[in-house]
Amino acid sequence: MGKEINISMLQMSSIIGDIEANIKKVKNITEQGLPENCDVLVLPEVWTCGWACDEFIRTAQNIDNSSVIDFLSQTALEHNVNIIGGSFIEERTGKYYNSCPVFDRKGKLVKVYSKNHLYSYYGCEEGTYITKGENPVMVNLDGVNYGLTICYDIRFPEIYRAYRKCGADVLVNCAAWGSNKPIPWEMMTKSRAIENQCYMVALTQCGPIRNGEYNLGESRIIDFKGEELGFIKNKEGIESAKISLNEMYQFREKCTILNDIKDNYEVKILCER
């Protein structure tokens, strides 16, 4: 119960469509900024190719033959750190997924979460290229439960409540969030932490995309009350924070909000006679 975890998030500006250049960038940022006592390193959504839907198929890789998987596995082993690997475009049996691979300290691939909700608005076409993941995925790393989500998933509180009911300690959202939506990003990520009494890692890319579009940056590590423990504005680098599971568990014992959830929220519609 007294467990403390050191979490680091890596914010970056991906080079569109260039996997090997982005691998080199992550390697450099990690070697320069990752603390020695880091327990978990989190990367952003599609850091491998940037948020460019028309590049997804060309940059897709199969897990069994992937430079991305090999690199993250080796990084986890070299730094003795668990890695929540943001996302890459995964090819699987002729379909394509926006997938988050997770590695333990020995470099073993332990879980893969595929994005459950696909963003296809305002000119974005993720759903044209990508297949929805079927289920939420929670992973246990060093005795801590992490509920995994990617970007647009943040708009669906149901998935986070499901994680909390299954015993989540930390909620993770790896994103490539547009710079024109700063208020929804801050409000929704803090809300998911508060309403579920969980720590939250809300990590996005920064910098230009293309055609005058930009990633927001503003990555946060948030505690179970909505307080920011770590923040990166709009630059590349690593930000870290220590979280205390004991404090969170004590708070949950004092404020048992999940006990007040009703089994049914049937809406009664009243009509005038």
Image (spheres, rainbow, N blue to C red):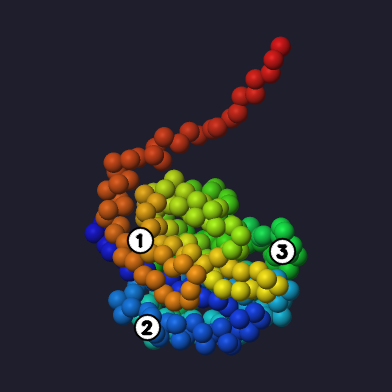
- Secondary structure under tag 3 reads loop
Residue indicated by mark 3 = 124
| Res 213 seen here | yes
* Residue at the front extreme, as displayed: 212
Whether tag 1 and tag 3 are in contact, CB under 8 A, the answer is no
Could you say which is closer to the camera, residue 135 or residue 236?
A: 236
Mark before the other along the chain sequence, 2 or 1: 2
Residue drawn at x 36%, y 70% as measured from the top left: 240
For residue 73, above or below residue 4? below
Image-quadrant location for residue 99? bottom right
Q: Is residue 89 left or right of residue 72?
A: right
Could you say which is closer to the camera, residue 182 or residue 141?
A: 182
Could you say which is closer to the camera, residue 103 or residue 153?
A: 153
Tag in front: 2 or 1: 1
Could you say which is closer to the camera, residue 143 or residue 17?
A: 17
Quadrant where the C terminus sits is top right
Tag in front: 3 or 2: 3
Residue indicated by mark 1 = 229
Looking at the rendered structure, the kind of residue marked 2 is His
- Counting from the top left corner in percent of width and height, residue 256 is at 35, 40
